[in-house]
Amino acid sequence: MNMNLRHPHNIFGEEKRIERVIGRYDEGVKGPLVICIGGIHGNEKAGLKAIDLMLKMLEVEHITNTNFEFKGRFLGVSGHLAAIRQNQRYIEKDLNRLWLKDKIEWLSQQNRNTLSAEDLEMFDLESLITHEIRDYGADRTVILDLHTTSADGGIYTIVPDHPLAIEYALGIKAPVVLGFLEGLKGTTLHYFTSHNFPGEVTSICFEAGQHDDPMSVNRAIAAITNCLRYAGCVEGRHIEGRHIEVLSEYSGQLPPLTRLAYRYPINPDEGFRMLPGFQNFQPIHKGQHLADNHAGPILSPMDGFILMPLYQSKGEDGFFIVKRASLYKDDEF
């Protein structure tokens, strides 16, 4: 695919109406199913823009590349419609902390008119994705959940500690962070797995950069492209090297594999305030002053790299700390 990624793209004007289904691409040749979610957090718009542009790229690819072949189906969906329209992370609860199997089963028995904002969003989104997985019946399904962060700094993928998921994430050509499923609950990564669906289902979260950085859109496009390639929907010979370069250039100096070592949960009304200037993957040391709350300074409990320092009004996590990792746990330090 020949999209030039050297310049940022802004494809959603103010008048564009966001729908649940952004679009599907399917040439009728059976193959993998790749479902891409943008806007699980409503103020993270880069993923939505990237999905929309990817669908446009696929539609015109045959014009410039007559040998182009696409196997399987690509589906792009919007996550939290209500929050997207208000440009808010969420309305009442973080939608990416609610994906619990018991919760999903409970929702299926409720009257949708009685559901809260996030419960209604999850009900509709889960129903759509579940129907797509079961209806298409692919041997291999990949869920790619696109995000951005309030802090500047590195891009990365978050995956379950499963060899197949790690293999897919490494194929995206961005740093991989392990262990997040142990530190959090109720994310899309927890729910969209082979345990809950037929066939081989793998979930990956890709963090494309800072919310308002136009290049975050381009990095998300590159991640989608590499995911389609690695899933087997498109062949590597049809993808220009720039899709790999745009990610490797941005992340070349970052640790390629890390593991979550610490999460700072924010308690209600504690008055959490992150100190300014921290970036993703910035090295920090034990005892370093990172943030403040009503009780005073919040110090780092260990050496490591800071991840997702909170620089927005809504959020349940103040910051994370990761450490260098190996595919073999005994080799980690």
Image (tube, rainbow, N blue to C red):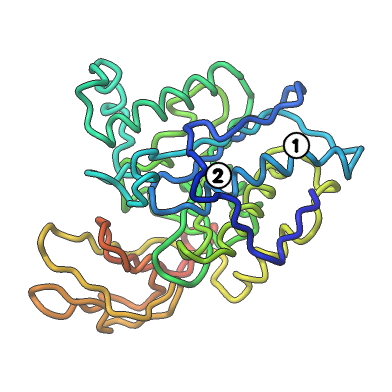
Label 1: few (<14), some or many (≥20) within 10 Å?
few
Q: Is residue 223 left or right of residue 194?
A: right
Q: Are marks 1 and 2 in contact (CB under 8 Å)?
A: no
- Answer with the quarter of the image where residue 240 lies: bottom right
Q: Residue at coordinates 64% horizontally, 52% vertically from top-left?
A: 221
Examine the rendered structure and indicate whether residue 118 appears above or below residue 293: above
Q: Residue at coordinates 33% horizontally, 51% vertically from top-left?
A: 89
Q: Amino acid at mark 2?
A: Ala
- Tell us which disc is closer to us: 1 or 2: 1
Examine the rendered structure and indicate whether residue 67 appears above or below residue 244: above
Mark 1 vs 2, N-terminal side:
1
Q: CA distance from mark 1 to mark 2?
A: 28 Å
- Answer with the quarter of the image where residue 74 lies: top right
Pointer 1: what residue? 59
Image quadrant occupied by the C terminus: bottom left
Mark identifier at residue 221: none
Indicate the secondary structure of the residue bearing disc 1.
helix
Q: Is residue 17 left or right of residue 182?
A: right
The residue positioned farthest toward the left in the image shown: 295
Q: Position of residue 102 (x, y in %)?
A: 27, 26
Q: Amino acid at mark 1?
A: Glu
Pointer 2: what residue? 165
Between 72 and 113, the residue placed more toward the observer is 113
Q: Position of residue 191 (x, y in %)?
A: 40, 34
Q: Position of residue 97 (x, y in %)?
A: 30, 44
- Answer with the quarter of the image where residue 265 lies: bottom left
Q: Residue at coordinates 18% horizontally, 69% vertically from top-left?
A: 272
Q: Is residue 288 left or right of residue 140?
A: left
Q: Residue at coordinates 27% horizontally, 23% vertically from top-left?
A: 107
Q: Position of residue 84 (x, y in %)?
A: 39, 45
The residue positioned farthest toward the right in the image shown: 66
Indicate the secondary structure of the residue bearing disc 2.
helix
